[in-house]
Amino acid sequence: MNRRRCFRIAFGCIAPIVLFALSAAATTAQTKKPPSPGPYESGPYDPRAFAAELHQLEASLQRQHATREDLDAFRSRLPVKWQVDTPDRHYDISTEPLRSILVDAERNQNARISHIEGGEEWLGNLANQVQNYSSRASSPNPIARKELDEILRRREFAAIQPPNAWDRFKQRISDWLVGMMENLLHQIGRHPLGAKFLFWLLLAAAVAWIAMMLFRFWGERGRIEEMQSIEHVAVHRSWQEWIRAARLAADGGNFREAVHSSYWAGVTYIEDLGVVAPDRSRTPREYLRLIEESSGYLPSERAKRRDSLAALTSRLERIWYGLRPARVEDFQDCMHQVEELGCRLP
């Protein structure tokens, strides 16, 4: 009797616990069971299969009873977008336009039939577009293709080619520089004081560059005008007048002009001797070559004059044309070379 009573008491305590555990497990299983919502994406389709899918949806929508529940069930089975793969590219086609039509049909009972017909028309138009694309892709026009090939073979299209590695590298550098400039301008725009400072700094740099270009232009123009004026003066001056001009320039501290006048004194002297014919269009190196090729003089005398004129020419090129600073020693050496040519200086 005591055993039965103990068994009943134990069974009465254990049974509720077992029942509670079983009910909790069932509840957990029902909670963890995922719902079966409509797919978010459908596909990928090829054009023909996608057109068939659209026609099936169109037929299914035509069979729908015009009730709110049926339309909601139809809309819940629609994916968010259809994926279509063609030989050209991949397409994602949204179902949002059709969903909006169905929502309007659910909300407005009076115009439900017209909204459903709008949904059918949308599906039919999309299916026709896909079918037309598929037919054009499967059967291209050979005449149009031939005409296109003939156009592309013309001379004006011969240089059109895909970008090579160097072109792509230059484009990346250009994009990087443009990005840097845009970032810099964006950062400058956040600091007005810094933007003003940068503006005036760039303006000052531009003015300085323009001034430097103008000075160089005027300097080169002055040198050209100076050399052109020398050509006219040299025709009328004797070698004695050139010597006096050289000494006057040296007395005034203008040793550059003194070297230049000394050179022309030597050239005018050898022209007076008849070694070379007067011609102010010659360059200093041409005068030197003519001295080397001259005849009627002893080789030793010709070599002596050549060495003296070579020294004068080298000095002139370095100081007059090379714009190097001239010193009194340069003038004295030039006068010595003029004497070596045969000038008897007073």
Image (cartoon, helix red, strand yellow):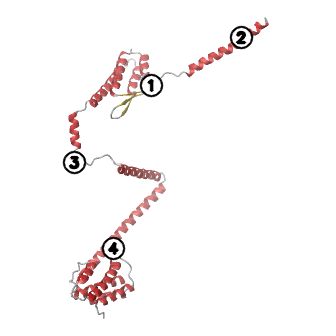
Look at 35% across and 50% down and name the residue there: 167
Q: Quadrant of the N terminus?
A: top right
Q: Hey, what amino acid is under mark 4?
A: Gly
What is the quadrant of residue 329 in the picture? bottom left
Query: Mark 4 highlights which residue?
Result: 219
Q: Which mark is residue 11?
A: 2
Name above or below for residue 328 compared with residue 186.
Answer: below
Cα gap from disc 3 to disc 2, whole angstroms? 101 Å
What is the quadrant of residue 73 in the picture? top left
Classed neighbour count for the residue bearing mark 3: other residues with Cα under 10 Å, few (<14), some (14–19), many (≥20):
few
Element on which disc 1 rests: loop
Look at 32% across and 73% down and name the residue there: 220
Upstream in sequence: badge 1 or badge 4: 1
Classed neighbour count for the residue bearing mark 2: other residues with Cα under 10 Å, few (<14), some (14–19), many (≥20):
few
Cα gap from disc 2 to disc 1, whole angstroms? 49 Å
> Residue farthest to the front?
299
Query: Mark 1 highlights which residue?
Result: 39
Give the label, 2 or 4, closer to the camera.
Answer: 2
Q: Quadrant of the C terminus?
A: bottom left
Classed neighbour count for the residue bearing mark 1: other residues with Cα under 10 Å, few (<14), some (14–19), many (≥20):
few
Q: Are marks 1 and 4 in contact (CB under 8 Å)?
A: no
Give the label, 2 or 1, closer to the camera.
Answer: 2
Upstream in sequence: badge 2 or badge 4: 2
Upstream in sequence: badge 2 or badge 1: 2
Upstream in sequence: badge 3 or badge 2: 2
Q: Hey, what amino acid is under mark 2?
A: Phe
Cα gap from disc 2 to disc 4, whole angstroms? 120 Å
Is 183 left or right of 142, judged from the image as shown? right
> Residue farthest to the top?
1
Q: Nearer the viewer, residue 58 or 211?
A: 58
